Amino acid sequence: MIRKLTVVLSFFLIASYASSQIYDPVSWDFSYEKKGEKQYELIFTASIDENSHIYSMDVPNGGPIPTSFIFDSLPGYELVGNTFEVTKPVELLDEAFGFKIKTFSNKAEFRQKIAVAGSSFTVKGAVNFMACNNATCSPPKDVEFIISNADKAADRVTADAGNLLSGQPPQKRGLLKFFLISLLAGFAGVLTPCVFPMIPMTVAFFSRGSENRSKSVFKALIFGISIVLIYSSLGIIVSLTSAGAGFANTLSTHWIPNLLFFILFVVFATSFFGAFEIVLPNKWVSGADSKVDKGGTLASFFMGLTTVIVSFSCTGPIIGALLVEAASGDVLRPTIGMVGFGVAFALPFTVFALFPSFMSRLPKSGGWLNSIKVVLGFIMLAFSMKFLMTIDSVYSLGILSRDLFIAIWIVLFSLLGLYLMGKIKFAHDSELKNISTFRLFLVIIVFSFVVYLVPGLFGSPLKGLSSFLPSSTTTELNIPKLISESRSYTSPVINTAATSILCSEPKHEDIFDMPLGLKGYFDYKQGLACAKEQGKPVLIDFKGHACANCKLMEARVWSDQEVLRRLKDNFVIVALYVDDRTQLPENEWIISTIDGKQKKTIGKQNEDLEISKFKTNALPLYVITDHEGNPLNNPMPANMNIEEYKKWLDEGVKLFAGKISE
């Protein structure tokens, strides 16, 4: 149930950015405003769907269709001057035309001054415009209008007969609805695989120090409020500083924060083992009462910051849509969205943070409370490896292999099992004369987990842990063939003779590997060229080294025999890592059409491609395209339902077959 809820919520957020089969993203509203005696201004307002735009009235020669207005010659009024733009357009480099073009997104307002001869007027005409996104454009379209002050009921005419028949109202979601969606996204974020390890760390943190209930509650509230404020600030900062939608991804994959958090986890674990106590410098505090309060406040805030940053590697697919919207410069919507997300995300953590205040009232005989801290210390040591794994994979260091990672976990959890049995003792432990029933069950669970890990050293996919472990391609042992080549299913297949045959040596194959024995490309243009040569559709896999859901999809969905056969036979796969930091030669650098910044690394260029063409930086994102990179069906986010994923793959193949047969 939890897994389904996560998938549904993630899909709902991302699907709102996918293109529909009928592309008609603009609705018009026509009105007027009285400016003086017999002086009026006609108001033309375009409501534009997210991820789409229309062009300015001022477009260079050889460019797209500009927005223009035609007025019928009717008695009773005359035009004063030309139609003018009220909304300031944004000028961006259009790669298709090769020069900068002024465009409008979200909303665009135009006005025309008129002088009226009598007391009433009726103005008829049409607006001609062209709408585009980064994947498709609509044909030039005329929308007729009638603006009159003769009847207030006719003051606003929103569309011509074609618009009325299509039932195309403005698509903007209200802020309240957007806030509620963000709340649901926040709860879904707590259910992601790399967020759960933060919960025991939170409990451990708030179980230390204060035994005063009111102070514990205060610290817990500061912790929760800090998470909300940090997420809210993120939306504002990204918007105001034009940091871009990849800001969170950059923060969660850069070596500096990952190294800092690795050290932080190790320090916390060492402290829980009893090596030392973490205390604030004496100069920060003064007085007996203020000492704990000041320390608790600062530490609670830092714990909130830690939780937010660590969670980015898993919550990125959910908040990616919010960050893309923030990058557009719209401050209010992303801020409200981030507040909603932060409130929902912080609530469970705050509840867990309050738990130690109740736990501290329980008897402390037998040193059970210290045992909890030691157990949490082992768990934190295990999860500290995640940060080293991120550094190793993102920077292609090749040091922390899958085998080594699993071996370290086997050792750590074996030591944890021995500790629970009383075979290992720390300085603050009480003597363990016998093992309670509860402790015995913990021992069984821990050693069962160790036994589960052992086959991973010899090639087992360990699907339940795939989101935490390095890629199976980094193993140093010989991996046996795990997936048999079943031929028991039928599906539309194109050019099966060319199964798994590449057209040329893939660029960057010395850096990246395809999972599950698949063959493919790691460069967008090279993949499109091979697909055209082989007559196959393209499956673009936007992924990341530190993307937990990407690994889950490969381990649980792509590894399915029928899914794997479809991937091998029917597609040219292009895997694009958006968090890779390998710098390209200078002659391959590009200027982003989104923020105008120079993109020098493989990851930045892939991220720019995903945002510009598909209006999201969610990971993973799967897109089936034709040979020009145009989507054939709706992009697919993380979806653990194998049957749905197979249907989506088959749908793309059928649409491609229909397109090439035209």
Image: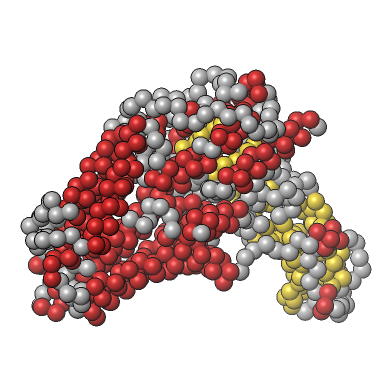
Q: Position of residue 52 (x, y in %)?
A: 65, 51
Q: Is residue 324 visible?
A: yes
Q: Position of residue 487 (x, y in %)?
A: 62, 28
To which quarter of the image does residue 107 belong? Answer: bottom right
Q: Residue at x 65, y 46 (%)?
A: 634
To which quarter of the image does residue 105 belong? Answer: bottom right
Judge by depth and name the residue closer to the eye, 514 or 452.
Answer: 452
Position of residue 483 in the picture relative to residue 95 (left or right)? left
Judge by depth and name the residue closer to the eye, 204 or 534.
Answer: 204
Q: Position of residue 258 (x, y in %)?
A: 30, 47
Position of residue 386 in the picture relative to residue 215 (left or right)? right
Judge by depth and name the residue closer to the eye, 466 or 70.
Answer: 466
Q: Is residue 256 visible?
A: no
Q: Residue at x 54, y 44 (%)?
A: 621
Is residue 357 placed above or below 64 in the rendered structure?
A: below
Position of residue 141 in the picture relative to residue 254 (left or right)? right
Judge by depth and name the residue closer to the eye, 544 or 415.
Answer: 415
